[in-house]
Image: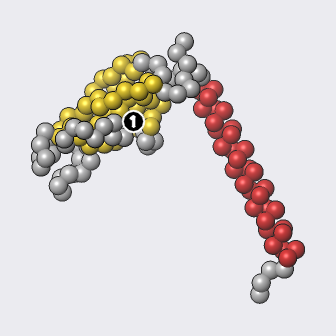
Amino acid sequence: MLPSGHELRRRRAGGFAGLAAVVMLVAASSSEAAARWGPTWSEVTGNLGTRTKMNLRPATIKQIDGKHETARIVKAEPGRHEIVVASPMRKGVAGSDANFTMDLEPCKRYYVNVQFESGSGADWQPVLAFVEKIAGCKVP
């Protein structure tokens, strides 16, 4: 049986109330993030910084200072950090991890990529492919 017009209006109103709750939750978490990071932060991403170098591939940022990360772009306090990145699977060979230390400057986004040594091998090293300024970030 199809719902009546009154039932449909009641359902839609509940849907809008649910949407309003989601919008308020997102706004609250955005303000929490702003309070946590303040006007200055740094970012690290494994997204591909450039396509001009052969055998350069995106990396996965797994950890910063021992904290496991799942975001594509990871925010961090400016300063020196221990970073763990993983290479993608290649030619049937599972990816591996590499650790390195990096100094992050305020208001900069760092693109850390995987540079394979050849077109077919699994040997690689992490490289800093690109650095850019973060819009809206204020250097103290």
Q: Which quadrant would residue 111 be assigned to in this image?
A: top left
- Would residue 27 be found to the left or right of residue 127 on screen? right
**Which image quadrant for residue 116?**
top left
Q: Residue furthest front?
A: 52
Q: Position of residue 20 (x, y in %)?
A: 75, 51
The x, y position of residue 76, in whole percent, is 46, 27
Q: Is residue 21 above or below residue 38?
A: below
In the rendered image, which quarter is residue 124 located in?
Answer: top left
| Count of residue discs | 1
Res. 111 visible in picture: yes
The residue lying toward the viewer, choosing from 7 and 62, is 7
Decide if residue 77 is in sight here.
no
Who is closer to the viewer here, 21 or 139?
Answer: 139
Residue 47's spot in the image, x, y percent? 36, 40
Q: Is residue 84 above or below residue 92?
A: above
Instruction: Indicate the quadrant containing the C terminus: top left, top right, bottom left or bottom right.
Output: top right
Q: Secondary structure at mark 1?
A: strand
Q: Residue at x 22, y 37 (%)?
A: 53
Relative image position of residue 78 (x, y in whole percent): 45, 19
Which residue does the image show at 31% across and 42% down from the upper left? 58
What residue lies at 43% left-to-right and 42% top-to-bottom?
72
User: Which residue sits furthest top?
Assistant: 140
Give the residue type that dot 1 points to: Thr
Q: Is residue 72 above or below residue 16?
A: above
Find the residue positioned furthest to the bottom.
1
In this image, 101 relative to 2: left or right?
Answer: left
Q: Residue at x 72, y 44 (%)?
A: 24
Is the N terminus in the top left, top right, bottom left or bottom right quadrant? Answer: bottom right
Drawn side of residue 139 relative to residue 86, left or right: right
Please give the residue where the numbered disc 1 appears in the rendered image.
Answer: 45
